[in-house]
Image (cartoon, helix red, strand yellow):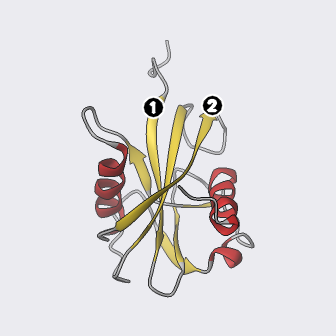
Amino acid sequence: MPDQVFPEPTVGIFIFNQAGEVLLLKSHKWPGKYVVPGGHVELGERLEEAAIREAKEETGLDIYDLKFIMFQQFIHDPAFWKHRHFIFFDFACKTDSLEVKLNDEAQEYVWVQPEAALQLAVDTYTRLSIEKILAGNLS
C-alpha cells in the first residue's frame, strides 16, 4: 500500500540576490544534483505563502517580488530519494541578504549566475525553470 494517495502540490523557489545570482542547494533528497529550496503547500496556504515560508525555513532568507515561472509534473522520478508524485509550482523571487542559514534538508549551497548554473549538475526540473527564466517568460 503506497503512503501517498494524491499528488502533492509543492513550490520551488528560485531566489535571486542583488547581483543576479540564483541560490542552488545540494540535498540528500536529490543525490548528486543541485536543486532550489522548496516544499509542500500546507492546507489553507496560498502558493506564494508556501514559497515565502519554505524559503525562510530552508535558507533563513526573506524573499519578495515573487513571479510565477511554470508548473511541472513529477511522477515517480528516481531522481528523488522517495517514490513520490509531486506537482511543482516554481517561482522566481528576490532577496536582499546573502546570509544563508540552511536547515537539515540541504548540506551545501552556492550562489551562481543562471547561465553558469546550467553548467552544473542541476536536476532536470531546476534546469527547465532556469531555462525559462533566461528566456524571460515569467508571469
Q: Is residue 59 above or below residue 43?
A: below
**In percent of the image, x 75 and y 73: which residue is there?**
119
Q: Residue 5: image x %, image y %?
A: 45, 17
Residue at (70, 65) in percent of width and height: 135
Q: Quarter of the image holding residue 64?
A: bottom left
Is disc 1 placed on a helix, strand or loop? strand
Q: Position of residue 60 (x, y in %)?
A: 29, 69
View extreme (left): residue: 44
Viewer-nearest of discs 1 and 2:
1
Return the residue found at the far bottom.
Answer: 19
Judged from this view, the residue extending furthest toward the right is 119
**In the image, what residue type sits under mark 2?**
His
Residue at (64% x, 74% y) in the render: 114
- Mark 2 — residue? 76
Per the image, label 2 sits on a secondary structure element best described as loop
* Relative height, residue 49 to residue 100 (above, below): above
Question: Looking at this rendering, what residue extends furthest in the top direction?
Answer: 1
Mark earlier in primary sequence (1, 2): 1
The reply, left or right, for residue 57 in relation to residue 125 is left
Question: What is the count of numbered marks?
Answer: 2
Question: How far apart are the alpha carbons under marks 1 and 2?
Answer: 12 Å
**What is the x, y in percent for residue 12?**
48, 53
Q: Please tell me which residue is depicted at 32% across the width and 73% down the height of the picture.
A: 101
Q: Is residue 11 above or below residue 6?
A: below
Which is more toward the observer, 116 or 138?
Answer: 138
- Disc 1 marks a residue whose amino acid type is Glu
- Mark linked to residue 90: none
Left/right of residue 135 with respect to residue 80 in the rendered view = right
Residue for badge 1: 8
Q: Position of residue 40 (x, y in %)?
A: 38, 41
Q: Residues within 10 Å of mark 2 (few under 14, many from 20)?
A: few
Question: For the residue carrying disc 1, how many other residues have a C-alpha within 10 Å: few (<14), some (14-19), or many (20+)?
Answer: some
